[in-house]
Image (spheres, helix red, strand yellow):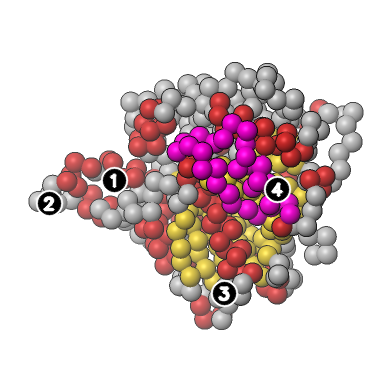
Amino acid sequence: MPRVYVTGMGAISAIGHNVAEAFQSLCDEWSGIGTMQYLHSQHASMPVGEVSLTDAELGAMTGLPDTTGLTRTTLLSIIAAKEAIRDAGITISEANGIRTGFISATTTGGMREFERYFHELQDPKAVGDFNQYADTLDSADHTEKVAAILDIHDYISTVSTACSSSSNAIILGAQLIKHGHLDRVICGGADALCKFTINGFKILMILDSEPCRPFDQTRKGINLGEAAAYLVLESEALARDGRVIWGELTGYSNTNDAFHQTASSPNGDGALLSMQQAIMMAGLSSSDINYINAHGTATENNDLAEGMAIQRLFGTQPPLFSSTKAYTGHTLAAAGSLEAVFSLLAIAHDRFYTNLNFKNKMEELEIEPIAESISKMVDIDFDPIENVLSNSFGFGGTNTSLLFSKVKDA
């Protein structure tokens, strides 16, 4: 089966307006979780991971002469996708004969703007600039607009599978390349904070009023965030054309617990199978995994299920693992691709990330995440990071694991 390589990455989140800034924040153990500044909500006291720019500032970052009618989700998507393309050192154009696709994921699409103008949009006689957002609630709206801006027409698709959305977008992109349908795919996801999301998670009683604490016994829930992140996936022939290769997508899997609408099975059955199948696809064994970027939402159910799955697969001496959601917040559909970027950075720089705010080991588990900076662990000898699992588990029991590996023969 043909191999799939990552040749470009782009990201914008609460910890950085580009990949380099985000990596520096991870290294500095700096969290972007803070007070809500740009979204007006009655739950403004809830900590969130906001991108620290207004819509107008995001519009300016896109470099477009006119951003009229573009939602915040779309603006984030444009910025991250353009960075990924620049990073890959390519020019997107159908004229070059390279079959190119754009696959983007989202959970709420243009909900932020739709809810802002909800009452006006209900009035068929109302006239105003808000009408430009009438169709943006459709999840595919941002995908089609970004693809048009990037001049991509060969293949366009939108994925919406809750919090595993952008990981599944990456899988779809890889499959299209492996089966010879496309040569290159820009894939990932974007989600902007909106009141619908905050209210919904508030009703579910899984928002934490303090900075979240993944895998901690005292965890109370998530901090929501917003972000966009994209990978440029390419066939081997394209990737080896003298350019930098971040890594290879050697394995992946999507499974389903079929357990509950919003909860994972307590024993982590779906998560376990997802990780097992990704490792099997890569032709590796569990002992080959050097680091796990866990989904780690800091909810009671997720961390127990994922922790149990990791312990069942790797035993009581698992690879080092941590959640980076205490840095960025849970960015929903963007989480998988954002953390895929973090995983590839871990491989490129031999860097593990501290699981912020962790203090108390979970009573149900014998394992625990990285609790302090690796630089402080002077008595531990680490192997180079060659294989990283990146987990994304969502509502509906959808579980996705991506396995990225260092390209030794690049």
Q: Position of residue 18 (x, y in %)?
A: 58, 48
User: Is residue 393 visible to us here?
Assistant: yes
Residue 261 drawn in magenta: yes
Seen from the viewer's position, the closer of residues 64 and 284 is 284
> Label 2, on which residue?
124
Query: Quarter of the image containing the N terminus?
Result: bottom right
Q: Earlier in the sequence, mark 2 or mark 4?
A: 2
Residue 276 numbered mark, or none: 4
Q: Position of residue 202 (x, y in %)?
A: 40, 27
Q: Residues within 10 Å of mark 2 (few under 14, many from 20)?
A: few
Element at badge 4?
Answer: helix
Left or right placement of residue 124 versus residue 331 in this view: left
Left or right placement of residue 332 versus residue 315 in this view: left
**Alpha carbon separation for disc pair 2 and 1:** 15 Å
| Disc 4 residue type (three-letter) | Gln
> Label 1, on which residue?
114
> Label 3, on which residue?
181
